[in-house]
Amino acid sequence: MTTTATSTKQFMTSGQLLEHWQGHRNLTRRVIEAFPEKDLFEFSIAGMRPFAKLAVELISIGGPALKGIVDKNMEAYNEEGFAPKTKEELLKKWDEETETINHYFAQISEERFQETFNLFGQYEFPVYQNILYFVDNEIHHRGQGYVYLRALGIEPPFFWERFSVR
């Protein structure tokens, strides 16, 4: 009988997870850019929110959630503090939050990714699961944006081009 020693290898580093998330954020930013100004704030289908409101939701989750995780603060979710009136204002805030995400993500130790954290005082999961939720939620809303763009006769960016330069 032969015994084979096995070692556990890490599937993904925290840096790779951040790169993956930021790739999605890059693509979502390009979707925002693709919208005509008026339609970004007004166009909707079947009662869904306009894409600007979906983008505000994403802005209100990523950076504030990571800050809460780092500071161990379970303050409630709030998207009322930011109400952009222009695409330029929305994109500026998007870029600021990208830097906020980078800043706070770098402060989460490998061990903390496994810790349970009650995000916004209502989502009690390991930190890594909360971060995966942020990515999943963004993909979901970006899909709505793709439907809106196609309904407006606009070709959305290719979904596989997450890491291309703007």
Image: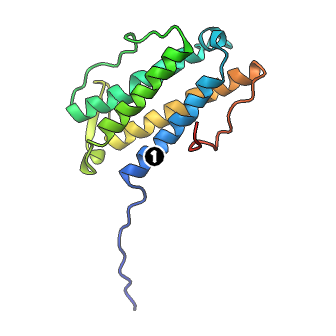
Bin the neighbour count of mark 1 within 10 Å (Cα to Cα): few under 14, some 14-19, many 20 and up.
some
Circle 1: residue type: Glu
Res. 79 visible in picture: yes
Q: Position of residue 27 (x, y in %)?
A: 58, 35
Q: Position of residue 147 (x, y in %)?
A: 69, 24
Name the residue beneath numbered marker 1: 19
Residue at the spot 27% in from the left edge and 43% down from the top edge: 108
Quarter of the image with the N terminus in it: bottom left
Residue at the spot 56% in from the left edge and 31% down from the top edge: 28
- In front of the other: 91 or 118: 91
Side (left or right) of 67 relative to 161: left
Quarter of the image with the C terminus in it: top right
**Residue projecting furthest to the right:** 153
Q: Position of residue 14 (x, y in %)?
A: 36, 50
**Residue projecting furthest to the left:** 72
Quarter residue 8 falls in: bottom left
Mark 1: which secondary structure?
Answer: helix
Side (left or right) of 164 relative to 98: right
- In front of the other: 29 or 46: 29
Q: Position of residue 81 (x, y in %)?
A: 37, 11
Quarter residue 13 falls in: bottom left
Res. 123 visible in picture: no
